[in-house]
Structure formats: structure tokens, C-alpha cells
């Protein structure tokens, strides 16, 4: 069947976690259906990638845009829309959508996140809408507010946005034919906090097994015990995870493993992240052309995340590369991995020290986690498998 796909960015190259999810699911949909793609490109960035998408999509249009300035307080308080949604609301985008759709009739429109779903609230109401939630916005902002220290003024603004966002989430749920989420935690949050009526489908995050293989890089394991933290280093949950690691975990871990090395790999490290490079044994690389050699160097990947919502692509990638993972429960939510079998889980600083220390000192444990982890990603966490589930669900529920 013919699908309209609407994205708030151009997800190629897939060099961020959300880009990987949206890009691989788009490829999967295009294998089984005719796909028309409309994507936003901020300030014209990645506009040159249009020919890549024309290779597998029927029609492709990129719409240039720039985010408007954040509104003044008086303007913000009087507007019923949350500012995080208004930041993506521009008249020329709505007009571009109308022109692109024209007289087409689609059995289904697939949009990424509620910032794009807002364009289907007043207009195009005859088109069924499925929303891929790379994260549930209300859940994410609640978790972010709980984890981060905020001043009085910012706390007031947070609550104002959360109140409006809750109403907006419920409005979106009434409009949706289906919400696609990253894990059962997201599904439960929608059910109990947003709407019990909206249909949901869990499509967890996965890994490209053709790319992430141990054989893809000849780099050997590091000689000294090495842990890796991987991700975008301007993303607040990652920055908070590193802050917790270095404030409460790192010193205790050094007592267990004095030769410990820490690799922090990811694009756009904030000054706070860059400052960790001054610590003994810590390397901050910034963006790298290929993350696979770093996965192979590391004895373990650490995922000390405290802010939830969605799932972390770094975990299935690491498992596919044969590098075991130590994570908080929040960091691994939705992946349904078993502690001690496919992953090591720890939710307090002391537990994180102990699980990481045990993983670094016990080679047999690492080997067992490596074998079971690779089997798990092969069996159920490849993008091909996950994309097929989404494609078949759309065909079953929405085909004319």
C-alpha cells in the first residue's frame, strides 16, 4: 500500500540514536510499501541527501526551516500550546504538507513524534495517523525534571509546560490510530497517564547486524581494563549520566580497578563533558567517523542513565559487537534483557561499582554475557526483524 511518512529531520547519515531508528524503519517500510517522504531540514542541513532517499522512496521532498525564537514569558503563558510543540509549528510547513499531499489519499500517515503530528490535528483529519514515538515527551520531561536540579523560575516554567503538554498528549492520543513506542515502559506510561483508549505497538530499538559485527574492525581489546560511554554528548540524559558516574561511581571503581581507563565517545561534547578528560585515565574523543573500534577496545560499556523515555541504541550495538553492558534499569528499559545473562543491571552507585568491577575482573562472566548478548540481538533486536513487524502490522491493520 502507499504510505506518507513525515519526519522532523533528515535521518541520514544515521549518526544519532533517533536517526538510526527512523532511518531503518523507513527502509523497512519502503521494502514492502510505496513510500512518499516529506522531511524537514533545519537551515538546509543534509539537503544534499535527497538523492539517497529517492533510491527507495516514490516521492521525496525536503522542507527548509529554522526554529523560531523561544517566546517571551507573557506570550508563553497566554498560549495554550506547550512551547516545546510551538517550537516546531511554522505556517510554511503546514502549506508544504498540503501541497505535497494534494489530492492523494493515503491509507496511513506515519509521522515521527508529536511535533509533526500537530500538523494533522486541524488539517487532513480524513487520513489515519500512526505516530512513531522515539520517546514519550511527557514521560521524558517528567523524568528530566526529577533528575536535574532546576532553579525556582525554571521550575515554574517546567510545570507550566508539563501541564500544557499533558493536555496536548491526550489530544494527540484521540487523533491517533496507533502510537508506536520503544518499549513496555513507554506503553504503560501512555496507558496510565495519557489515554487508555489509544492503540499502541511496541517496536523496540535495534541494531544493523550487517554493520555492527565484531569482524567489521580488526581492533583488539585494550590491554588495560577499559569501559566505554557512547552517545551524543550534548544530550541532557547523557550529560546527567556522566555527571552521576564521575560524582558517585568513578572514584569507588578505581579502588576496585586502579588501572581503569574510561572512553567517552560521541559528538558535540559540552564543556562539562570535555572537563572529564583532565581525570586520570579518561579520554574524551568528541565525534568519531566510526564507533565500532571503540566498542571493540572496551571490556564493558557503561550506561549509567537516570532519565528514561525510549530505549538506548548503544546497548544493542554494544551487544552486537561483543562488548558486554552494565546499565541502570532505566537505561535498558524496553529491551527485556536478563540481569546476569545478557546484561548487568545496577541502580545505585554502590551496585554500579560492584557490577562494573565484577565485570572487569571476571573474564568468564564477560565471555558469557558476550555470547548470550550476541544471540539475543540476532534473534530479536535486528532492524530487519523489527522493521518487518512494523510493516506487517501496518499492512494488516490499514491496507485498503
Image: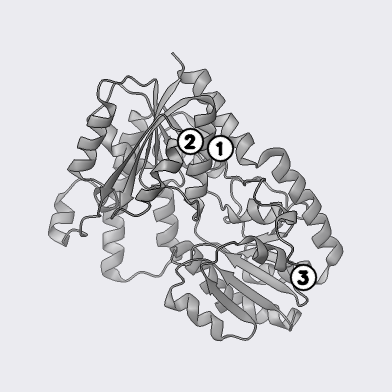
Q: How far apart, in angstroms, are the residues tagged by discs 1 and 2?
A: 7 Å
Q: Dividing the picture into quarters, in which one does residue 324 lie?
A: bottom right
Helix, strand or loop at mark 1: loop
Q: Secondary structure at mark 3?
A: helix
Q: Is residue 341 visible?
A: yes
| Quarter of the figure with residue 196 | top left
Secondary element at image label 2: strand
Circle on res. 203: 1
Instruction: From the top left corner, tell me how far across and down residue 94 is, in percent.
Output: 22, 37
In the image, taking residue 263 as reference, residue 102 lies left or right, namely left
- Lower position in the chain sequence, tag 1 or tag 3: 1
Number of the label disc, if any, that sits on residue 114: none
Residue 223 location, quadrant: bottom right
Mark before the other along the chain sequence, 3 or 2? 2
Q: Tell me if I can see residue 309 in this picture.
A: no
Q: Earlier in the sequence, mark 1 or mark 2?
A: 2
**Left/right of residue 180 with respect to residue 223 in the rendered view:** left
- Crowd band around label 2 with a 10 angstrom C-alpha radius: few (<14), some (14–19), many (20+): many
Outermost residue to the right: 364
Residue bearing the label numbered 3? 360
Badges 1 and 2: C-beta atoms under 8 Å apart?
Answer: yes
Mark pair 3, 2: CA separation: 37 Å
Residue 178 x %, y %? 44, 29
Number of residue marks: 3
- Please provide percent x and percent y for residue 230: 58, 64
Residue that numbered label 2 is attached to: 180
Label 1 – label 3 distance at C-alpha: 32 Å
Q: Counting other residues with Cα less than 10 Å from the Cα at mark 3, is it few (<14), some (14-19), or many (20 or more)?
A: many
Amino acid at each position: 500500500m502507499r504510505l506518507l511518512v513525515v519526519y522532523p529531520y533528515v535521518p541520514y547519515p544515521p549518526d544519532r540514536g533517533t536517526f538510526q531508528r527512523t532511518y531503518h524503519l523507513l527502509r523497512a517500510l519502503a521494502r514492502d510499501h510505496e513510500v512518499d517522504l516529506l522531511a524537514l531540514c533545519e537551515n538546509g542541513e543534509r539537503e544534499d541527501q535527497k538523492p539517497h532517499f529517492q533510491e527507495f522512496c516514490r516521492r521525496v521532498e525536503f522542507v527548509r526551516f529554522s526554529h523560531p525564537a523561544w517566546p517571551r514569558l507573557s506570550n508563553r503563558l497566554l498560549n495554550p500550546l506547550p512551547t516545546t510543540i510551538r517550537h516546531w509549528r511554522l505556517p510554511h510547513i503546514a502549506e508544504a504538507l498540503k501541497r505535497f499531499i494534494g489530492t492523494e489519499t493515503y491509507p496511513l500517515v506515519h509521522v515521527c513524534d508529536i511535533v509533526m503530528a500537530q500538523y494533522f490535528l486541524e488539517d487532513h483529519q480524513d487520513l489515519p495517523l500512526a505516530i512513531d514515538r522515539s520517546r514519550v515527551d511527557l514521560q521524558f520531561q517528567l523524568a528530566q525534571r526529577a533528575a536535574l536540579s532546576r532553579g525556582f523560575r525554571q521550575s515554574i516554567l517546567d510545570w507550566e509546560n508539563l501541564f500544557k503538554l499533558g493536555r496536548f498528549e491526550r489530544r494527540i492520543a484521540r487523533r491517533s490510530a496507533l502510537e508506536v513506542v520503544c518499549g513496555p515502559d513507554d506503553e504503560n506510561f501512555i496507558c496510565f497517564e495519557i489515554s487508555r483508549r489509544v492503540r499502541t505497538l511496541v517496536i523496540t530499538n535495534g541494531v544493523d547486524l550487517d554493520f555492527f559485527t565484531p569482524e567489521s574492525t580488526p581492533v583488539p581489546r585494550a590491554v588495560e581494563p577499559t569501559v566505554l560511554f557512547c552517545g551524543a554528548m550534548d544530550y541532557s540524559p547523557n550529560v546527567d549520566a556522566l555527571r552521576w558516574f564521575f560524582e558517585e561511581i568513578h572514584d569507588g571503581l578505581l579502588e576496585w580497578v586502579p588501572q581503569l581507563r574510561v572512553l567517552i565517545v560521541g559528538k558535540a561534547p559540552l564543556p562539562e563533558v570535555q572537563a572529564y578528560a583532565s581525570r586520570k585515565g579518561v579520554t574524551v574523543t568528541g565525534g568519531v567517523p566510526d564507533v565500532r573500534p571503540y566498542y571493540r577496545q572496551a571490556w564493558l560499556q557503561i550506561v549509567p542513565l537516570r532519565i528514561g523515555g525510549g530505549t538506548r541504541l548503544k546497548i544493542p550495538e554494544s551487544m552486537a559487537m561483543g562488548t558486554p553492558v552494565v546499565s541502570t534499569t532505566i537505561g535498558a528499559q524496553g529491551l527485556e534483557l536478563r540481569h546476569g545473562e545478557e546484561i548487568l543491571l545496577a541502580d545505585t552507585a554502590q551496585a554500579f561499582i560492584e557490577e562494573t568491577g565484577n565485570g572487569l575482573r571476571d573474564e568468564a562472566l564477560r565471555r558469557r554475557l558476550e555470547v548470550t548478548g550476541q544471540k539475543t540481538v540476532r534473534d530479536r533486536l535486528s532492524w530487519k526483524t523489527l522493521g518487518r513487524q512494523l510493516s506487517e502490522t501496518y499492512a494488516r491493520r490499514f491496507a485498503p
